[in-house]
Image (tube, helix red, strand yellow):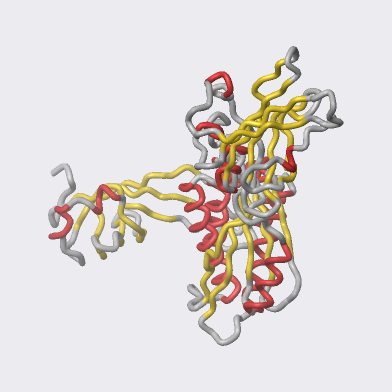
């Protein structure tokens, strides 16, 4: 016969069944929730006396946040019964009187902290269920927000870490920076301008479904330049679609359509995903368009694409300038310019942190008599078939030289 937990005389009644964790000749461990309050109960069968014909269960109340934490395994199941709010812990002992058609429950309120140890779940027992801890993500929300706010709204979905809606903080930060920088790079590529001002991706919140970052484009113009933002997101979707192909040739072919800046920023987007075994989904809706575009690459496809891009990067090369002229040096910004007198080549770039921190540099002069020797690291971010490699230079060492001679004189 069914035990009527739904009608028990406890705080928050009547109740309704949520889910069952252990079933053996009936529900043994399960969850209920109040029909009138935002309140849950974990229910656990703790004793069965066949000779007396009784079965005892314990009910422990939990607010929604606590319920999700226990359900996901973030908090031990035992804690659901040891850390309980006042008037939130009950025992219900069921018996089968001869004159009753259904089991009858005797309910007693229990003072939290007084449950016998034999009635508590094992010390290391945990539930282990995927649990939503943020509002569920619905693609329609992107369309509705874009239409209502008259601005482009997009979502980046990645694989969550664990059973709840979360993603490692450092990786999340790296991804947010990379997404923003990739938007800037694509906007510059589309517009033909070095920088597009007044158009900024704004982080707008988190949704559940693994882990979803919700964004909106903030424009300082009366109307968002949707011809620009539409091209940006079409190109970003094409990059992700190429990654989803699982074909190295297709990934590199798509990458070669773009500037070095776009290529590098896309690689930066993929790196934290690969580190955390995550896939990537882009859902976008251009301002007032009423439509949504979705592109997805799985975790394995993201990894394959990243490795293909990595393979196209050349190892750093070191250039030794035995005698050069220091034409420019800004310790504050970390920039430099040196001409190699022997090769006639000019190098411009940034100092390494070690060089930038060298206080001896502050007194150096620049110009026709500023002779130096230097070691420069050359990085080729992406080798293009078109020859547009975008080599970047980093100053590793810098030594002043006399007007004649070399560093060894």
Q: Pick the residue in front: 328 or 270.
A: 270
**Residue 312 visible, this angle:** no
Residue 369: image location, x then y, percent: 17, 63
**Residue 1 visible, this angle:** yes
Residue 98: image location, x then y, percent: 84, 23
Residue at (56% x, 87% y) in the render: 222
Quadrant holding the N terminus? top right
Left or right of residue 367, residue 378 in this image: right
| 49 relative to 363, above or below | above
Q: Pick the residue in front: 103 or 73.
A: 103
| 247 relative to 348, above or below | above
Residue at (71% x, 53% y) in the render: 296
Q: How many marks do you count on the picture?
A: 0
Residue at (51% x, 57% y) in the render: 176
Quadrant holding the C terminus? top left
| 253 relative to 91, above or below | below
Residue 138: image location, x then y, percent: 71, 60
Residue at (69% x, 69% y) in the render: 285
Residue 149: image location, x then y, percent: 62, 77
Figure quadrant of residue 318? top left
Residue with the most extreme bottom position: 222
């Amino acid at each position: 016969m069914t035990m009527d937990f739904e009608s028990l005389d406890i705080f928050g009644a009547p109740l309704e069944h949520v889910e069952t964790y252990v079933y053996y000749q009936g529900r043994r461990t399960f969850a209920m929730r109040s029909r009138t309050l935002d309140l849950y109960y974990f229910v656990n069968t703790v004793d069965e006396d066949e000779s007396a014909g009784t079965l005892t269960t314990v009910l422990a109340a939990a607010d929604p946040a606590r319920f999700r934490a226990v359900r996901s395994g973030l908090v031990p199941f035992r804690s659901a019964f040891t850390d309980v709010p006042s008037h939130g812990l009950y025992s219900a002992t069921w018996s089968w009187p001869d004159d009753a058609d259904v089991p009858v429950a005797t309910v007693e309120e229990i003072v939290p902290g007084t449950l016998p140890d034999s009635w508590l779940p094992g010390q290391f027992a945990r539930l282990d269920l995927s649990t939503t801890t943020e509002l569920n993500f619905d693609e329609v929300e992107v369309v509705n927000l874009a239409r209502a706010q008259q601005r482009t709204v997009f979502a980046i979905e990645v694989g969550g870490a664990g059973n709840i809606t979360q993603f490692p903080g450092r990786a999340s930060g790296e991804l947010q920076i990379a997404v923003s920088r990739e938007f800037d790079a694509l906007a510059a590529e589309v517009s033909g301008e070095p920088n597009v001002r007044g158009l900024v991706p704004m982080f707008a919140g988190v949704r559940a479904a693994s882990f979803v970052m919700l964004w909106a484009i903030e424009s300082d113009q009366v109307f968002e330049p949707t011809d620009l933002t539409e091209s940006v997101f079409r190109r970003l979707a094409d990059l992700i679609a190429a990654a989803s192909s699982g074909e190295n040739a297709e990934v590199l072919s798509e990458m070669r359509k773009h500037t070095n800046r776009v290529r590098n920023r896309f690689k930066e987007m993929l790196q934290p995903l690969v580190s955390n075994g995550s896939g990537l989904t882009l859902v976008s809706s251009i301002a007032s368009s009423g439509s949504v575009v979705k592109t997805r690459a799985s975790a394995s496809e993201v990894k394959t694409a990243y490795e293909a891009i990595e393979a196209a990067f050349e190892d750093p090369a070191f250039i030794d300038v035995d005698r050069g002229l220091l034409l420019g040096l800004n310790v504050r910004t970390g920039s430099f310019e040196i001409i190699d007198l022997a090769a006639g080549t000019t190098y411009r770039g940034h100092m390494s942190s070690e060089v930038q921190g060298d206080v001896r540099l502050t007194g150096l002069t620049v110009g026709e008599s500023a002779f130096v020797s230097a070691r420069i690291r050359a990085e080729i971010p992406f080798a293009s078939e078109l020859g547009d490699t975008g080599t970047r230079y980093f100053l590793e060492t810098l030594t002043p030289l006399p007007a004649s001679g070399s560093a060894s004189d």
